Image: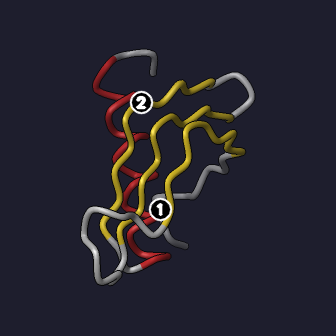
Amino acid sequence: MRSQGFHDYVREKIIEQAVQATGGRVELRDLDFHLSNLTANAYGLVIHGTESDPNTPLLSIDHIYLDLKLVSLISP
C-alpha cells in the first residue's frame, strides 16, 4: 500500500470524487497520503467550472488537509 501505484490510485480517486461533486475539471499537483491515520495533504488543487474566462479557475488552493474514509468495494 506504499507503492507509487497505490499513491496514484488514491490521488485519482480524490480527483474523481471532486469532479463528481463539482461537475468541473479538477487538477491536483501532488498528494502526501498517510495510511496510518487515513489523512492526506493535497497540494495545487485547482477546480475549473463553467466560468467565462478559462484561465481563471473557480477554485485554487495551494494546500489542503483531508480526512479520508474507507468505502467497501463489496456490496452486501
**Could you say which is closer to the camera, residue 15 or residue 9?**
15
**Could you say which is closer to the camera, residue 59 or residue 70?**
59
Within 10 Å of disc 2 (Cα), the crowding (few <14, some 14-19, many 20+) is some
* Secondary structure beneath label 1: loop
Q: Residue furthest left?
A: 54
The amino acid type found where label 2 is placed reads: Asp
Quadrant for residue 55, please give it. bottom left
Q: Earlier in the sequence, mark 2 or mark 1?
A: 2
Q: Which residue is mark 1?
A: 74
How far across and how far down the image is residue 56, in percent?
36, 64
Figure colour scheme = secondary structure
Does residue 10 appear to the left or right of 34 in the view shown?
left
Within 10 Å of disc 1 (Cα), the crowding (few <14, some 14-19, many 20+) is few
**Could you say which is closer to the camera, residue 11 or residue 62?**
62
Q: Residue at x 62, y 24 (%)?
A: 34
Q: Residue at x 62, y 25 (%)?
A: 35
Total count of labels? 2
Does residue 49 appear to the left or right of 35 in the view shown?
left
Q: From this view, report whether residue 10 is shown above or below residue 71.
A: above
* Secondary structure beneath label 2: strand
Does residue 7 appear to the left or right of 40 in the view shown?
left
How far across and how far down the image is residue 5, in percent?
28, 26
In what quadrant of the picture does the C terminus appear?
Answer: bottom right
Q: Which residue is mark 2?
A: 30
Q: Residue at x 68, y 35 (%)?
A: 38
In what quadrant of the picture does the N terminus appear?
Answer: top left
How far across and how far down the image is residue 14, in percent?
46, 52
